[in-house]
Structures are given as C-alpha cells and as structure tokens.
C-alpha cells in the first residue's frame, strides 16, 4: 500500500517550486491532492500530466488574500472528496530583503496576509472540521531559517516566518491530545523560481544578507525539501508534534 493511499491533502503555493514537488510526490504515493495557487497555465499543465500518470490531482486558481477563501477551500475538499487529512501551508510572499527603516506598510501587510494570516485561516477551518468529526489531522507549515534567525531575509519575511513557527507550536500544543499534529520545516538556501521575484532588492538588506551566504555549504532542491514535508505529513512522523525541522545543508550550524 502506498504511503498516502486514501488520504486527501490540500497544498498551497503548488504551481511552482516546493509546492509543486510536494503535489507530485504525494500524488504518486496515492493521495488525492488539491493544489492551490495563482498560475493558471502552469496548473493546467501540472494537472494534465498528473492525470496521465493516473494520479488524482485537482488544482484551484485563487488568491489566498481573498476574504473567506480559506474556508471555501477546505469546504470544497470535504464536499467533493468526503474528507480532509493533510494541510500543507506552503504559499509565501517575499519582501525584497527590506530592513525595518525601508519597509512600507503595503509590503508588510501583504507578506503577513500571505505568510501568516492565510495559514492560520486554513488551519482554523481544517481544525474545526477535525474536531467536529473527532478524527486525526495533520498540518505541515513551510517556514524558513529566516523564522529562526534575523539575517536571512528582510524584516517582513523574517517576522512572518517567526510568526508561522509560533502558529505551528501553538496549534501543536492546543490540539495534540485530539490527534491533530502540526509541524514545520525551515528550509535554507534553495534552488527555486522564487529568486526571480527579487526584482528590486534592498541594497542595505541584501548587502547584510550576503555576509552569511558564504557560510552556506550547499543549496538544496525542491525535491529534497518535499521529501521532508512528506515525512512530516505521513504516519512515519507520528511521534513528532510542534517540531521545526531545519533543512539547510548545515548552513545554520556555522
């Protein structure tokens, strides 16, 4: 039997990068996967390729900043597939490495809306369902080493990932006795398309960031990160709750 046979999972930010890798790997291991994102063309290609492989994958095009969308996503999964087992909060917004004296309110609020509020609202909807049905549930949050240290990104992204780790630990504490687990992964340097989004990085912020880049011994791949997420989403990690798994090739031990 495949590791995720019979499981239903929601994955946000699933049209590229880590989210796409998680979608493809989880579907290959038997899960019914609902991918959430904004890239219609990429999602069409992903869904078509997965269906050719015989995998059950559905993609939803939406903005996580839209009011009430999180409850509708969870309700859709339950109404269409009869249940929800796994939630992977992967979608994120960057901040151009802006330090505190440069960041504007729009960037700050946008980063927090995507990186903290949306995961909280999706988790809230999923947890309410699991509590009402008295069934287990599993949440995996994609944080960052930026959520553990101060010099890996700009102030908004750094603060948002610290908050996401706080959300992870609070949910783990509050619902662990109800068989609802919540863990996080904190990736370091990764080969993703996100780097293309740094169109106008802050010189102040990026110059300071570069001071630590020389200590990074290796750059990871989306597939390597996805393997850890799948482990956290599986029964193999049943004894883990509230954990933050650092996946950075040893960057933060230097």
Image (tube, helix red, strand yellow):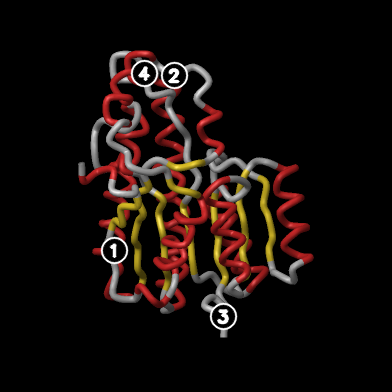
Tell which circle, 3 or 2, labels the residue nearer the N-terminal end: 3
Residue at horizontal 54%, vertical 28%? 197
| Image position of 52 (left or right of 185) | right
User: What is the spatial separation of the Cα atoms under label 3 and label 4, in whole angstroms?
Assistant: 46 Å
Tell which circle, 1 or 4, labels the residue nearer the N-terminal end: 4
User: What is the spatial separation of the Cα atoms under label 2 and label 4, in whole angstroms?
Assistant: 11 Å
Q: Disc 1 marks which residue? A: 172
Extreme left residue here? 254
Q: Nearer the viewer, mark 1 or mark 3?
A: 3
Report which quarter residue 229 is drawn in. Answer: bottom left
Tell which circle, 3 or 4, labels the residue nearer the N-terminal end: 3
Q: Nearer the viewer, mark 2 or mark 1?
A: 2
Residue at horizontal 38%, vertical 24%? 97
Tell which circle, 1 or 3, labels the residue nearer the N-terminal end: 3
Quadrant where the C terminus is found in the figure: top left
Q: Disc 4 marks which residue? A: 103
Nearest to the observer: residue 200 or residue 39: 200
């Amino acid at each position: 039997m495949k590791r995720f046979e019979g499981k239903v999972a929601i994955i946000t930010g699933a049209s590229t990068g880590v989210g796409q890798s998680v979608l493809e790997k989880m579907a290959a291991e038997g899960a019914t996967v609902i991918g959430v994102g904004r890239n219609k063309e990429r999602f069409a290609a992903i869904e078509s390729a997965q269906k050719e492989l015989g995998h059950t994958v559905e993609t939803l095009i939406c903005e996580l900043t839209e009011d009430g969308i999180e409850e509708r996503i969870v309700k859709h999964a339950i109404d269409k597939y009869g249940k929800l087992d796994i939630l992977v909060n992967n979608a994120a917004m960057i901040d151009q490495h802006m330090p505190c004296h440069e960041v504007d309110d729009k960037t700050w609020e946008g980063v927090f809306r995507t990186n903290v509020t949306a995961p909280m609202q999706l988790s809230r909807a999923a947890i309410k369902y699991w509590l009402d049905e008295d069934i287990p549930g599993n949440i995996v949050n994609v944080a960052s080493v930026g959520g553990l240290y101060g010099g890996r990104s700009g102030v908004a992204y750094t603060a948002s990932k610290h908050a996401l780790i706080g959300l992870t630990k609070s949910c783990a504490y509050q619902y662990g006795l109800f068989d609802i687990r919540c863990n996080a992964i904190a990736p370091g340097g990764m080969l993703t398309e996100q780097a293309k989004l740094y169109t106008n990085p802050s010189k102040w912020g990026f110059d300071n960031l570069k001071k630590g880049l020389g200590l990074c011994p290796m750059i990871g791949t989306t597939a390597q990160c996805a393997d850890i997420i799948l482990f956290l989403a599986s029964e193999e990690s049943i004894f883990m709750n509230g954990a933050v798994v650092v996946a950075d090739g040893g960057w933060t031990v230097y």
